[in-house]
Amino acid sequence: MGASKLMSSLKEACGVAGIILKNPESVKEAAYLSYLCAIALQHRGQESAGIASVDEMHNLTIYRDMGLVSQVFDQSKLDTLEGHLSISHVRYSTTGESEVCNAQPLIMKSKAFHNLALAHNGNLVNANQLKEELLKENFELFTTSDSELIINLIGREINCNGDNWTFDAVIEVFKKSLDRACGSFSLAVSLGGEYLVGVRDPNGLRPLCLGAIKDGNNIKGYVIASESCALDVVGATYIREIAPGEIIVINKDLQINSGYLNNINPKFCLFELVYFARPDSDINDVQVYAYRENLGRLLAINSPIPPGADIVIGVPDSGTPAAIGYATQSGIPFANGLVKNRYIGRTFIQPTQSIRQLGIRLKLNPLPKIIGGKSVILIDDSIVRGNTPGQLVKLLKLAGAREVHLRISSPPIMWGCYYGIAMKDHELIARKMNGNINEICKHIGADSLSYLELDNLLEATHQNKSSFCTACFNGDYPVKIQDKDEYKKDDKKLILT
């Protein structure tokens, strides 16, 4: 998301992956591939990581802990994860506390399949109602995560079904259980060692795709993952996006069938394309890098180009494609004016305000010989809370920049998200400033500030504009927020009355 979110990190959508293999080379191969998928999806969640693996005798092994994938797993831990079917997850908490009990995958005992394992990306907006319903039925809940509600809903329907497990029976179980869930959910689920199931909510708010692992001309296995970059890392061939509301079921013989939830109404999160997705992913049938570069071109066309500007620089990493597009369109040279420290990870120890203000230099460092004496156009993908852009502008000027003109390749973020991104109305700088760009610019300390308009973002997808969720930009929420107590309204939140 660039530096504007570095010091007050936006909590991201999680990453999920599922692997199912036929005749694997070793009993640990599925877990190792699942681990590689989790590494590829690390940008989607950095609080916890976990992998569950299951063999054909339904024996399930799981390991999960707080931290990055590389911190949670080493070879000795991966070697304990045996089986032909594996589920992995990287997490940022959007509901539920940041603690190990909420790390995923979640597991549950099942009469039919011995064990279920589930990895969830998204956020339910009727979690309170579902929790009350399950507690009345004497279900025990051990976490504070809405994902536990989903696995209990699925487990309840499985236990009601008996022993007749055809593709149609599995699909029906997921239809009955998930038609009660409102909000966003992309799921990777293992039903014992029999089935790998992938599901997207009826709006398709969060991404999920399908790929095949081949051995020559033969299909050796399938991969379900949040983004295509996870397919690439395990050498899988991208097949397609799993459709909004689709339930895709793969058995241990690699046969596939699918069905659909009710009330399908595609509303893919536009902010996934702006920020969350890795630039090397194809997501929702959009090549992310090319999309962001095109936003930079549109930004140069539709926003004032500062007279006398010398160079264009991007905030690494997600601002860089737009900066290249802006430079190409405007004719102003692109330069690498900021160097990113890629090895620091997240910084938790920030005991004083002065130390917090220094923290940006741990992440980004300007190059005085590049920017000294220059009028700089600084490109970023978005401004959310606005804590860091001012620090970055100040840092560039201290490094010798004559002027810093900030250009943002998305509109002002005015509304909170309730579908898997932890940003609330009262935290948003554009909301605090009532959308007044001059006031935002003054607060940040830039010499000028311009945003890209929402229509430009939608047009650049070359898809039906109505098929995207744009709630954080315009307050048009596609799913009614049912948990009124969970999401308190402030005085300006008119959409949720």
Image (cartoon, rainbow, N blue to C red):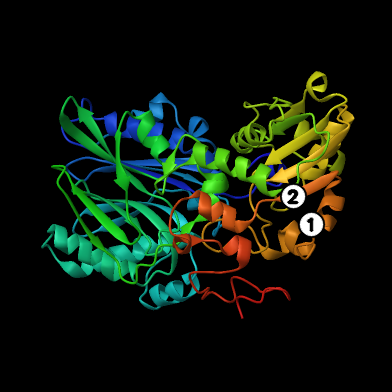
Mark closer to the chain start, 1 or 2 = 1
Please tell me which residue lies in front, 322 or 17. Answer: 322
Q: Which quarter of the picture shows residue 226? A: top left
Determine contact: label 1, label 2, CB under 8 Å.
Answer: yes
| Residue 30, percent from left and from top | 28, 34
Please tell me which residue lies in front, 4 or 11. Answer: 4
Q: What is the spatial separation of the Cα atoms under label 1 and label 2, in whole angstroms?
A: 8 Å
Left or right: 258 as drawn, with respect to 204: left
Q: In which quadrant of the rendered image does the N terminus lie? A: top right
For residue 142, say whether it is visible: no
Q: Secondary structure at mark 1?
A: helix
Q: Which quarter of the picture shows residue 378? A: top right
Kindly identify the amino acid type of the residue bearing the numbered disc 2. Answer: Ser
Residue at 22 percent of width and 52 percent of height: 249
Judging by the rendered image, the residue that carries numbered circle 2 is 450
Height in image: 67 above or below 144? above
For residue 103, say whether it is visible: yes
Residue found farthest to the bottom: 497
| Residue 478, percent from left and from top | 49, 69
Residue at 54 percent of width and 69 percent of height: 477
| Residue 262, percent from left and from top | 31, 71
Left or right: 199 as drawn, with respect to 465: left
Q: Secondary structure at mark 2?
A: strand
Height in image: 487 above or below 222? below
Height in image: 217 above or below 478? above
Label 2 neighbour load within 10 Å: few <14, some 14-19, many 20+: many
Kindly identify the amino acid type of the residue bearing the numbered disc 1. Answer: Ile
